[in-house]
Amino acid sequence: MTVTVYVPRDAAAIALGADEVAAAIERVAGENGQDVHIVRNGTRGMVWLEPMVEVATETGRIAYGPVSASDVASLFNAGFLSGGDHALSLGLTEEIPFFAKQTRLTFARCGLTDPLSLADYEANGGLTGLKKAVAMAPHDIVKTVTDSGLRGRGGAGFPTGIKWNTVLGAPGNEKYVVCNADEGDGGTFADRMIMEGDPFVLIEGMVIAGLATGASEGFVYLRSEYPHAITAMNEAIAIAREARILGADVLGSGKAFDMEVRVGAGAYVCGEETSLLNSLEGKRGIVRAKPPLPALEGLFGKPTVVNNVISLASVPVILDKGSEFYRDFGMGRSRGTIPLQIAGNVKHGGLFETAFGLTLGEIVVEIGGGSASGRPVRAVQVGGPLGAYFPSSLFDTPFDYEAFAAKDGLIGHAGIVVFDDTVDMLKQARFAFEFCAIESCGKCTPCRIGAVRGVETLDKLAAGSSPESRKALVADLCNTMKLGSLCALGGFTPYPVMSAMTHFPDDFQPASMNEAAE
Amino acid sequence: MANSANGTLEQRAREISASHAGRKGPLLPILHDIQHEFGHLPEEAMRAVADELNLSRAEVHGVASFYHDFRSQPAGRHVLKICRAEACQASGGDAISEAAARKLGIAMGETTHDGHVTLEAVYCLGLCACGPAAMIDGKVVGRIDEDRLDQLLSECRQ
């Protein structure tokens, strides 16, 4: 009897040795004469357990992890092919608390299926959303997405349906769907995970966006730092084209939509939508002034939907189960689910999809299990390099766009980076300026010059040179960058800087002053 | 000799450009292909691309120099990229970058004198829950400690 064994092909699993584990399983099975079928699935998102191997048994999929190649022989000895007990046994995957507590809508298939099996995809609910969309009028598709309350998951949180409606109403026959897969924010990996673990769902979402807005061509702008995602998307697109999900006649609807992957070239700023469009056009990734909105004059000057990977990947389930189903999850104006990415110095790091509304403390302490180092958690940066640092005194903040804005923060792409008490917040504030200086496109002065001056000023502060006036200068500089920058790179760099200064003032007292005070 | 080498290079650059004919916004894919083949973007190739796309030499240079990925000089035989973004910082990434620079005797962005290793910073590989992370010759590595770093560096020397 053939036993199916799952070994993830996700980059995080591979970075921790999944390829070697898969090879070892194949080798030992061969030696033992056991018939094993290895499926390279996506990850279930429990990165601290990767490489997490699953075995299909009559009672369900049983997990083992973290497995290294040297554990494989002992797994066979323990009879893991029939779910045998072993020191690395985790029990049924779906009963692992971190997994069981989630609400998986967008990531429903990620880790469950073979990412490149269209049959697997359809058997697990794939394509039902698109099949419904094909039979709907564009206006009705847009209305369903609008009613679901879905907001842009890239960070800005703009209602997806309203953006689509603008493109639908824009005149012209040439329109585009652009997927922003330039997930450059440190601490985020949801886009990578879905593209590697369930690429068809992004394709399905993009086709639906095309049908809804009248666009027949799509681009996935995918960062070069994600080679595994690039391969998975390219292979999935070829399979989808073969199955006529893409092409001149989408599922026999008579409507055309095709798409391709375009690889970025290491510029963080190209995650900003107008800079991304310039890059796609083959230009320097310089930010464009808005208006005109990309929805009206986007790629090659044509009406363009620009959406994040997770926004687009959430569309199929909305079309499949209806706007009310999705809208009923969440709180306030943050509807549906959000894939939290728990990272950094944390015990249980990984992706946790849940309805909006958990508090930051629940996420970091209960789900994440606190710091990996065992030391007290001191700061948590939410929303990538342009997100604010939160102290534990703000752990009661619920995960919601508005609640975070009210605390001078942002949820961004829902990356949550945990730091223990060894963190130096002055250094982190300096890094925020330094990163902005490295990645600035150079178009606007507050960002290009401000970031450099910010680094210099914090260096002087650290050296003990008139710290009070330096702090006032940094605050003033942040104000200028926030109000005067063209895009979020310069405009949001003040979030990490100011939150570090506000919530961790002790770190901004130069050592010489602390000594004088003692 | 040099002329004939440049002749081939220019010809290949033209062939690569032509292979993208009909694509919208083809410059980035062309530059990626040229760098993939030659390891960097040679001057002669850039002139040929500009000519093929009917762009000015300055426009092509402007694009090539904007993006961190594109090189005007070849890299070392191995390229070690270490993540310096926040999640890796939180899990001890700074110490790994410093150790790598010290052991190789170079700074970030430099290549060792023997041309074996180029050391570069990268800002996020999406391996934020298993940092510190790195990429060596396109292969991803997570949870790097000093031992793992030594192992990677010794692989580079072979």
Image (tube, coloured by chain):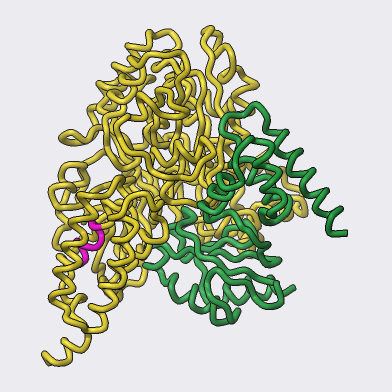
Chain colours: A yellow, B green
Q: Which residues are magenta?
A: A494-500
When asked about the image quadrant of residue B50, the answer is: top right
Question: On the rendered structure, is A205 left or right of B75?
Answer: left
Residue A495 drawn in magenta: yes
Please identify the dominant SS of the magenta region. helix
Q: Is residue A88 above or below residue A45?
A: below
x, y percentage for residue A245?
Answer: 56, 19
Against A322, is A377 above or below? below
Determine whether A295 is above or below A134 in the image. Answer: below
Q: Position of residue A509 (x, y in %)?
A: 18, 80
Q: Name the residue: 37% across, 39% down.
A: A288
User: What is the quadrant of residue B81 in the picture?
Assistant: bottom right
**Residue A252 is one of the magenta-drawn residues:** no
The N terminus of chain A - image quarter: top right
Return the x and y of residue A500 as percentages of the image width and height.
21, 65
Q: Nearer the viewer, residue A367 or A435?
A: A435
Tell me if residue A206 comes above or below residue A229 in the rendering: above
> From the viewer's perspective, is B142 left or right of A500?
right
Q: Nearer the viewer, residue A288 or A252?
A: A288
* Residue found at x 39% / y 17%: A213
The C terminus of chain A lies in which quarter of the figure? bottom left
